[in-house]
Image (tube, rainbow, N blue to C red):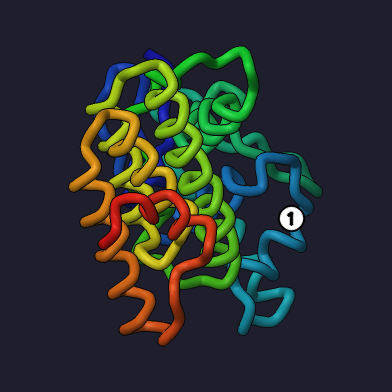
Amino acid sequence: MARQLSLLGGFQLRCAAGQDVPVSRSGQRLLALLALQARSLERLWVAGTLWLDATEERAGASLRSALWRLPQPEGAAVVEATTTHLRLARDLAVDVHELAARAEDLDTPAVEDGRGLDPSALSRDLLPDWYEDWVVLERERFRQLRLHALEAQCRRLTESGRFGAAVQAGLAAVAGEPLRESAHRTLIQAHLAEGNPGEAVRQYHLYRRLLAGELAIEPSAAIRELVRPLLR
C-alpha cells in the first residue's frame, strides 16, 4: 500500500501501513496546496498564498516552521524541498488526482460502462470545511468534473443495461446539484430505458417544481420532449 493523502471529504494522511498520520493545521494547508497545484511551486508564492496578511518575512518564517513540523511517516519526507521550490513527494498518492483521472476516462470510448467508479466516491466534496480562496476555486472545478462524470457514468451504465447502477449514478448527480437539468435528463433517460415511465414522469415533475420554486422558470424543451408522450 502506497502512502496516501486524502482531500475528499476532509484531510487525511496515511502511511504505507495504513495508519493515520497526525498533521498540524499549517502542515495540512501546505500539503493540500502542493497537492492541488500538482507541480513544483516557488517558496515565495506558497508563503504568500498561505499567509496572505503577513509580511513577506513573516510569511517565509511561517512556511519554514510548517515545513519543520511536517511528519515523516516511515522516515520518508512528504515534501520535496529546495532553497527556492517545493513540491509534494512523488510517491505520495493523492485521492483527488486518482479519482479525477478515472472520471475523465469516462468520456473516452475505451471505457465501456464505468463500473470501476462508485457513485459514493464521486459524491464527496473537496475539503468541505475549508474556505480559503484557493480551496474554493479547486472545489468548484472538481465539483464540475464529478457531476459530468456521474452523468457520463449514468449514460454508460444505461447503454449497457445496468439500470440499477445507472439510476444510482443519476441520483448522485442530481443530489450534487439539484437544479442541474442535464443530471435530471440523464436520470429520466435511465428510468425510461429500464421501462419505468412512472419514475421518469415523477422525476420530471420534481425537477419542474424545483425550477419553479428556485428560479421561477420552466424546464427546457429538451427535457419536456422526453416525457411529453407520457404527460396528460
Residue 188 screen position, x and y as percent: 35, 46
Q: Is residue 19 visible?
A: yes
Residue 230 screen position, x and y as percent: 29, 51
Q: Residues within 10 Å of mark 1 (few under 14, many from 20)?
A: many
The residue at the point 51 percent across, 66 percent down is 220
Image quarter hosting the N terminus: top left
Q: Quadrant of residue 191?
A: top left
Q: Is residue 23 visible?
A: no
Disc 1, SS:
helix
Vertical arrangement, residue 186 with respect to residue 179, above or below = above
Residue 25 screen position, x and y as percent: 39, 60
Total marks shown come to 1
Residue 152 screen position, x and y as percent: 50, 35
The residue at the point 38 percent across, 49 percent down is 173
In the foreground, 187 or 43: 187
Q: Quadrant of residue 117?
A: top left
Vertical arrangement, residue 70 with respect to residue 115, above or below = below
Position of 85 with respect to 199 (left or right) is right
In the foreground, 58 or 175: 175
Position of 3 with respect to 37 (left or right) is left
The residue at the point 69 percent across, 81 percent down is 55
In the foreground, 227 or 61: 227
Residue that mark 1 sits on? 43
Instruction: Give the residue type that dot 1 points to.
Output: Arg
Image quarter hosting the C terminus: bottom left
